[in-house]
Amino acid sequence: MPSKLTFKITEKDPVSNEVLYDSTLIKHDDGHITGRIQNIGDKTVQHPKVYAVVHGYETVLDIVQNMEFIEKIEPGEIVEFSMYPDLAITDDVF
């Protein structure tokens, strides 16, 4: 039997969480980051994760995610997060 292949672009609503780039987003001396995210949408977001790329001088060192388990973020709610790079590379974090 001849086969037939079709493609369909996935339709998905964009995630409504936004990292707040203000004075609360801090890179600490040991390389870890603390900050806040806000749900700027009109729906509750379940189990959100925050990811960041950790850079050294002209190189990517690590990819990290928030340490805290966030069950949900209601519309308008602001939640704090923290991220820690691998201890083996903290001296090289730019």
Image (cartoon, rainbow, N blue to C red):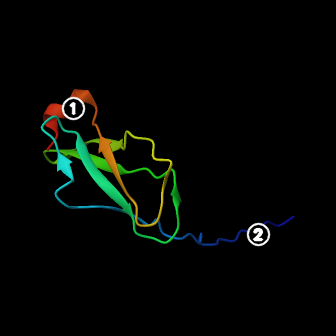
Q: At x 12% / y 38%, what residue is drawn?
A: 29
Residue 41, given in percent of the width and then of the height, sits at 45, 70
Left or right: 80 as drawn, with respect to 46: left
As rendered, which of 87 and 66 lies closer to the eye?
66
Name the kind of residue labelled 2 in the image: Lys
In the depicted structure, whether residue 40 falls above or below residue 86: below
Residue 31, given in percent of the width and then of the height, sits at 19, 38
Left or right: 1 as drawn, with respect to 83: right
Residue 24, given in percent of the width and then of the height, sits at 20, 54
Report which quarter residue 69 is drawn in. top left
As rendered, which of 59 and 90 lies closer to the eye?
90
Name the kind of residue labelled 1 in the image: Ile
Q: Secondary structure at mark 1?
A: helix
As rendered, which of 38 and 32 lies closer to the eye?
38
Disc ID at residue 64: none
Question: Which mark sits nearer the N-terminus, 1 or 2?
Answer: 2
Residue named by callout 2:
4
Looking at this view, name the residue that lies furthest to the right. Answer: 1
Of badges 1 and 2, the one in the foreground is 1
Left or right: 63 as drawn, with respect to 75: left
Looking at this view, name the residue that lies furthest to the top. Answer: 88
Question: Crowding near pointer 2: few (<14 within 10 Å), some, many (20+)?
Answer: few
Residue named by callout 1:
89
> Are discs 1 and 2 less than 8 Å apart at CB?
no
